[in-house]
């Protein structure tokens, strides 16, 4: 938008008037400030207090570990890599809902960890968790 200054017809002022823009932004800001508290759809309820109970069928978690020298352990008992899958299959037969935790030393190559995970999958274990150190 161009305005003439009145002095000369060739002098044109090409400045943008930001007053309407500021007005619109202030209206939007006030609108958002007023509507933001209404967007919280939380329902306030008081939940009943109960006593803590144990699960009906507590299953034991088996831990498979790989140390820094690539040795494999099932619950602190060393196992040969070839015997890992058959031993896990026996544990799955005893408890079909077997929960397994895998922990590996950070220096163990990914290839060794991937082989152990493949053995765990082939053995029929359906619940697997990988343990790590927090904050690392």
Image: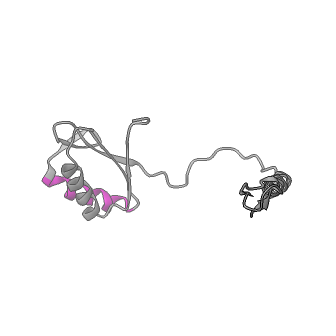
- Give how far across and how far down residue 30 sits, in percent: 85, 52
Q: Nearer the viewer, residue 29 or 24?
A: 24
Q: Residue at x 55, y 55 (%)?
A: 56
Residue 12 drawn in magenta: no
The answer to whether any part of residue 87 appears in the image is no
How is the protein colored in the picture?
one colour
Q: Main secondary structure of the magenta part?
A: helix
- Give how far across and how far down residue 16 sits, in percent: 74, 56
Q: Nearer the viewer, residue 31 or 127?
A: 31
129 relative to 4 in the view: left or right = left
Res. 11 image quadrant: bottom right
Q: Residue at x 26, y 62 (%)?
A: 123
For the N terminus, which image quadrant?
bottom right
For the C terminus, which image quadrant?
top left
Q: Nearer the viewer, residue 13 or 11?
A: 11
75 relative to 131 in the view: left or right = left
- Give how far across and how far down residue 76 sits, in percent: 27, 38
62 relative to 74 in the view: left or right = right
Q: Magenta stretch? A: 82-96
- Give how far across and how far down residue 88 sits, in percent: 26, 56
Res. 122 image quadrant: bottom left
Give the number of callouts.
0
Q: Nearer the viewer, residue 10 or 72?
A: 10
The answer to whether any part of residue 7 appears in the image is yes
75 over 19 or under it: above or below? above
- Residue that extends furthest to the front in the rendered view of this protein: 8
């Amino acid at each position: 938008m161009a305005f003439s200054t009145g002095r000369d017809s060739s002098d044109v002022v090409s400045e943008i008037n930001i007053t309407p823009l500021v007005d619109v932004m202030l209206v939007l800001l006030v609108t958002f400030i007023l509507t933001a508290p209404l967007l919280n759809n939380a329902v306030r309820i008081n939940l009943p207090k109960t006593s803590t109970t144990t699960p009906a069928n507590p299953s034991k978690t088996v831990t498979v570990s790989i140390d820094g020298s690539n040795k494999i352990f099932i619950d602190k008992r060393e196992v040969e890599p070839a015997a890992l899958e058959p031993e896990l299959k026996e544990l799955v037969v005893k408890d079909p809902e077997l929960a397994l935790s895998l922990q590996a030393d950070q220096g163990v190559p990914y290839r060794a960890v991937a082989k152990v995970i493949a053995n765990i999958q082939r053995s029929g274990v359906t619940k697997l968790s990988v343990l790590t150190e927090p904050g690392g």
